[in-house]
Image: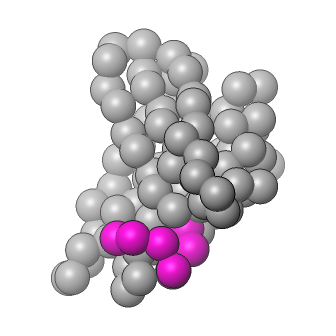
Amino acid sequence: MSYQFKASHITSGNVVFPDKLEIDEEKVIFYKAKLIGYESTVIQRNAIGSVSLHAGLLFADIIIETKGGQRTVANGFTRSNAKRIQKILSE
């Protein structure tokens, strides 16, 4: 199964170009948009060491750390989506 999540436009750093996560059975792709184009990070699911949340009142950041020490932070997701992402990646 494949999932797509998009950060809220009303959060800091996401007003014009929100962060995006695509999750499937094998990998997670994190998209960080730029003024022109975007930067993507591919993380194999079997390489994920931990997934944590940094939650505020309405929104949360997803922190994905690999077993090799790479740290990826996706900003500005709703708390409910962030919890769902965390659950999917922890399975």
Does residue 83 appear left or right of residue 10 in this picture?
Answer: right
State how many labels appear: 0
Does residue 38 appear left or right of residue 22 in this picture?
Answer: left
Does residue 39 appear left or right of residue 42 in this picture?
Answer: left
Q: From what the image shows, is residue 20 above or below residue 66? A: below
Judge by depth and name the residue closer to the eye, 40 or 85.
85
Q: Residue 18, located in which quarter of the rendered image?
A: bottom left
Is residue 11 visible to us here? yes
Which residue is found at the position 51% from the left and 80% from the top?
Answer: 10
Which residue is found at the position 58% from the left and 68% from the top?
Answer: 6
Residue 83 placed where, x, y %?
73, 44
Q: Which quadrant holds the C terminus? A: top right
Residue 14 placed where, x, y %?
41, 74
Which residue is found at the position 68% from the left and 37% from the top?
Answer: 86
The residue segment tinted magenta is: 7-13
Which residue is found at the position 48% from the left and 37% from the top?
Answer: 63
Q: From what the image shows, is residue 59 above or below residue 37? A: above
Q: What secondary structure do most residues of the magenta stretch adopt?
A: loop
Does residue 60 appear left or right of residue 81 in this picture?
Answer: left
Answer whether residue 84 is magenta in the image.
no
Residue 66 placed where, x, y %?
42, 22
